[in-house]
Amino acid sequence: MNERMKEIEKRLAEIKEEVDKPEADLDALQEESRKLADEYDELKKKAETAEKRQAILDAAMREGRVTRRFSGGEERGERTFAVDTPEYRVAWLKNLQGKPLNAEERTAITASAAIPTQTMNMIVGRLDLNPLLNAIDISYIPSNISFPVEGTVNDASWVAMGTAAIDSADTLTSVTLSAYKLIKTVEITADVEAMAIDAFENWLVARLANKIDVALDKAILSGTGSSQATGIATTIATESGTFTKAGMTLKDLMKIIATLPTKYARNASFVMSRTVFYNEVMGMTTTTGDKVVVADMQAPGKFNILGYPVIIDDNATIDATDNVFFGDLKEYKLNFAKAPEVARDTSVGFRSGSTVYRAMALADGKLVDKNAVVRFERASA
């Protein structure tokens, strides 16, 4: 991946020189440059995702390694139960199902409640499938963290030779992320004990991780900030503008794009509900008859609006009012102070013989730069 990114950087540098040549095919170079830039951005996103997963695995490896000594017959020595081993995964899942464990499995589970590597990969993979979560900046730092934010920042100034520069009065503020509980419980009958290990793991991830995914998605856009993440709409309490009540127009779309400061435009994306996108934007054309929406050739299920990616998310409709967000979503920071963990309790369902499973994480998120995203509401009249 890194080699390909270096190749793209080298080729973009070559194109920068080729455009100045008299015989240069500017249209072809422009198209090649656009495709390379898109490919580079996609590789960069994959690299960031890989780093996040590795951070989780490294933390799990530090906390989840258990060693048990044993002896007998010809087999003597130490056996290690690490969270990335098949033995630990089976023991952890059997324990959640309520199945009997042997002595070694009981020792491993008692010493570490960490989620097995394979199961954690499945959970993180579910989160990565959410376009909004994939677009923001997610970290896994086990503490409250602060992000520096530019306040007043002056431009660089030209200084004559031999003249001393004068310090400018720049200011910095910070945004702090705390650790709020995010919990989802699911009750299931005793039949879960009869499920095969793989089937149980798939069920567990689907039922619990998906619900965490939904809660995070909603909080990113409209979280209140009270015992939960602060949503973009909450940070931008006063909307940047409105769009036509009867249906978004091309003029509305141009106004949304023009409102975002230029420095945030390169990584900008749209976020809107399915209704707004398919009913009002999908068929829109420019004054010259060109389509505003174009399918991504590398991923036909994805769309671009005038070259900007669009994330279709029904949580963009807040309190029955349609919103359209546009900006650099990487300026929204979400931190897991504690990665998702799973626990089991049979006492709640004693009468029915059922079992309750709970997924819990500690997380918080905020838009650290409120200028990076603009928010437009549907006009009330």
Image: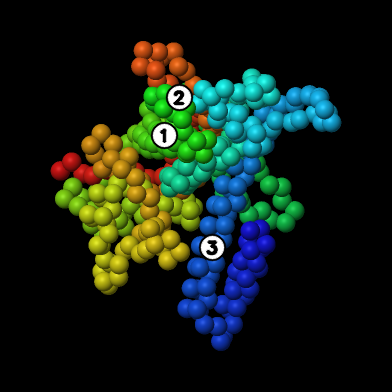
Along the line of sight, which residue is nearer the eye, 274 or 66?
66
Tags 1 and 2 touching, CB below 8 Å: yes
Along the line of sight, which residue is nearer the eye, 15 or 360?
360
Disc on the earlier residue, 2 or 3:
3
Image location (x, y in percent) of residue 148: 57, 35
Q: Where's the N terminus, which quadrant?
A: bottom right
- The residue carrying mark 1 is 207
Query: SS at mark 2?
Result: strand
Tags 1 and 3 touching, CB below 8 Å: no
Query: SS at mark 1?
Result: helix
Query: SS at mark 3?
Result: helix
Q: At 55% across and 52% down in the image, what residue appears?
A: 45
Q: Identify which amino acid the numbered label 3 is placed on.
A: Glu
- The residue carrying mark 2 is 357
Q: Identify which amino acid the numbered label 2 is placed on.
A: Tyr
Q: CA distance from mark 1 to mark 3?
A: 34 Å
342 relative to 324, above or below: above
Image location (x, y in percent) of residue 169: 59, 38
- The residue carrying mark 3 is 39
